[in-house]
Amino acid sequence: MPGELTKPDRLAPVTAERGDEQRALFRRWPAGVSIVIAEVDGIRHGRTISSLVSLSLEPPLVGMSVAQSASIHELLRSADTWAISVLAGGQEELAQRFARSGVPPLVLWDGVETRDDDPRLIVGAAGWVTARTVEMVVTGDHTFFVGHVESVEEGLAPTTLVYAYREYHAL
Ligand SMILES: Cc1cc2nc3c(=O)[nH]c(=O)nc-3n(C[C@H](O)[C@H](O)[C@H](O)COP(=O)(O)O)c2cc1C
C-alpha cells in the first residue's frame, strides 16, 4: 500500500523536535560554502550560505535560501542584485567570520580582500556569480531568492570549501 510505504515506523514522526532532526540529517549532507554580499546605498553586508543552487541554464538562474531572521535578509530584499563568492579550500576563516552574528562592519571587513572590479567579490575564491533577483519566494521561515545570472567566473583556486559533519573540508 502506498500509504504504508510512505510512513514506515522507523521514520521520525513530525514532532516539535522536527527542526533538530532535520538539522541533524542535513549535517550529513555535504554542501559547498559561499559568501553572499549585497550593497544598497553604501551599506554592504555579507553572510555565509550553503544553500546556493544552480537552477537553470536557459535562462541562467541560481537560487539561495536565506532565513528571514538573518541580518542580511532585508538588505537582500531591497537589493536588485547580489554577488556570490564560492569559497576555496583554506578560506574557512572567512566562512566562520561571515556566519558570526553581531560582528561590527569594521571587524567583519577587516583584511577582506575584494576584487577591484566589484567590491562584492572576494579575492582567492573558487568562483564568483553575480545575479539579479527575479523572484522571492517565501518558504516557511526562509525566503528563496531566484537570481538571473549576470556574470559567472571560475577562480584559480584548486579546491572548494565544503561543510559537512559541522566541519570544513577542502575538496
Ligand atoms: C556553513 C554555513 C552555511 C550557512 N548557510 C546558510 C544559508 O544557506 N542560509 C541562511 O540563511 N543562513 C545560513 N547560514 C547562517 C548564516 O551564515 C548566519 O550565521 C546567520 O544568518 C546568523 O547571522 P546573523 O545573526 O547576522 O543573521 C550558514 C552558516 C554556516 C556556518
Image (spheres, helix red, strand yellow):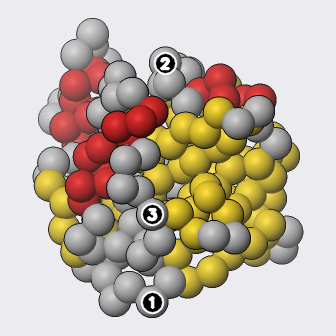
Q: Where does residue 58 sit, x and y in percent of width and height?
A: 83, 73
Q: Is residue 142 visible?
A: no
Of tags 3 and 2, the one toward the viewer is 3
Name the residue beneath numbered marker 2: 69
> In the picture shown, does residue 132 fall above or below 101?
below
Q: Nearer the viewer, residue 148 or 4?
A: 148
Report whether 39 appears left or right of 167: right
Q: Where does residue 97 sit, x and y in percent of width and height?
A: 30, 44
The tag earlier along the polypeptide, 3 or 2, is 2
Numbered badge on residue 29: none
The tag earlier along the polypeptide, 3 or 1, is 3
Q: Quadrant of the N terminus?
A: top left
> In the picture shown, does residue 12 fall above or below 6?
above
Callout 1 crowding tier (Cα within 10 Å): few <14, some 14–19, many ≥20: few
Q: Where does residue 157 sit, x and y in percent of width and height?
A: 38, 85
Q: Residue at the location (80% across, 52% down)?
A: 132
- The secondary element bearing badge 1 is classed as loop
- The secondary element bearing badge 2 is classed as loop
Label 3 and label 1: CA atoms lie apart by: 16 Å
Name the residue beneath numbered marker 1: 156
